[in-house]
Image (tube, rainbow, N blue to C red):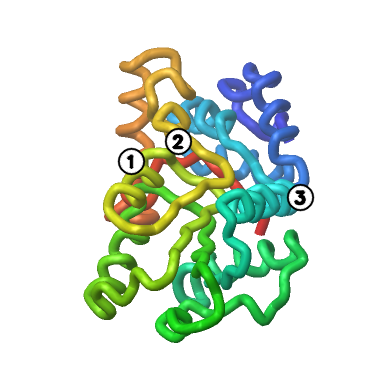
């Protein structure tokens, strides 16, 4: 609770209460406090400011986003698609497939594992739809498309390929569209202004923002040395329901 925190954080009681409310159902007050206390006292205010800009999407939110994405397929006159979770079973794509199937009341027979994608080109389906949770730079989708082209050549164009992600950055989506034949769609579209260290997002000015970025990079390197601010420097401020 708030009284566990140092005075430097407790003076921001209104901001803390907004954070507690935002994460209701996802993280307890105690978990939020413990996260803030991971930081050195002189860095906790920066962590608090960043935390206040996080957006939490619960399971009901994800269900509604899945429905919107399916509507986009119908709008594009995709009438007989099959669905593939992007990436191996240990990744998030297969989990999103489960949510997507339930949200849209689709048959399990039309969902396939990523390893089966090579067998789907000569089937009854008019489109192969890849499902993913998040698009940052878009590079993973681009690398996947390059692999397909290398393996199948022009034959890959016998099917329409769609790439649907629950959320992501517009520049990542545009990168995919510009460098592949994947028809990319996002359920929630973010911009550079939503990134953690866009100057006016969480901080008052450029100098405070840059100071906070340097500090958080040091913490991030302890967890993920090659991508301290998120994969490919995504700087995403998002929490989704497990």
| Residue linked to disc 2 | 40
Residue positioned 56% across, 51% down in the render: 76
Callout 2 touching callout 1 (CB < 8 Å):
no
66 lies above or below 101: above
Q: Who comes first in sequence, dot 2 or dot 1?
A: 2
Instruction: Determine the residue positioned at 55% across, 43% down.
Output: 238
Res 94 quadrant in image = bottom right
Left or right position of 52 against 28 = left
Q: Earlier in the sequence, mark 3 or mark 1?
A: 3
The quadrant in which the C terminus is found is bottom right
- The label shown at residue 217 is 1
Q: Residues within 10 Å of mark 1 (few under 14, many from 20)?
A: some
How far apart are the two marked residues, 3 and 2, measured between alpha carbons?
Answer: 36 Å
Label 3: which residue? Answer: 60
Residue 5's disc number: none
Q: Is residue 216 toward the left or the right of residue 38 in the image?
A: left
The residue nearer to you, when weighing 95 against 210, is: 95
Q: Nearer the viewer, mark 2 or mark 1?
A: 1
Residue at figure coordinates x 30%, y 73% from the top left: 148
- Badge 3 marks a residue whose secondary structure is helix
- The residue at 52%/54% (across/down) is 165
Question: Please, what secondary structure does the residue beneath circle 2 have?
Answer: loop
Residue 5, image x, y percentages? 64, 31
Q: Are marks 3 and 1 in contact (CB under 8 Å)?
A: no
Q: x, y (%) of residue 230?
A: 39, 48
């Amino acid at each position: 609770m708030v009284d566990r925190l140092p005075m430097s954080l407790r003076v921001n009681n209104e901001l803390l209460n907004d954070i507690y409310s935002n994460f209701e159902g996802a993280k307890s007050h105690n978990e939020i406090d413990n996260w803030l206390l991971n930081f050195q006292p002189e860095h906790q205010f920066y962590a608090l400011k960043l935390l206040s800009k996080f957006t939490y999407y619960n399971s009901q939110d994800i269900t509604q986003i899945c429905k919107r994405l399916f509507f986009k397929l119908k709008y594009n006159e995709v009438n007989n698609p099959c669905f593939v979770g992007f990436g191996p079973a240990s990744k998030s794509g297969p989990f999103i497939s489960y949510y997507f199937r339930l949200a849209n009341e689709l048959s399990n027979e039309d969902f396939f594992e990523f390893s089966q994608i090579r067998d789907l080109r000569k089937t009854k389906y008019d489109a192969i739809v890849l499902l993913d949770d998040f698009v940052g730079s878009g590079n993973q989708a681009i690398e996947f498309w390059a692999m397909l082209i290398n393996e199948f050549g022009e034959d890959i164009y016998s099917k329409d390929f769609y790439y649907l992600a629950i959320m992501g950055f517009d520049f990542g989506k545009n990168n995919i569209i510009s460098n592949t034949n994947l028809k990319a769609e996002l359920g929630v579209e973010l911009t550079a202004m939503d990134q953690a260290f866009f100057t006016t997002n969480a901080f008052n000015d450029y100098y405070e923002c840059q100071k906070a970025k340097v500090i958080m990079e040091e913490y991030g390197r302890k967890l993920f040395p090659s991508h301290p601010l998120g994969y490919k420097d995504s700087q995403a401020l998002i929490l989704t329901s497990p």
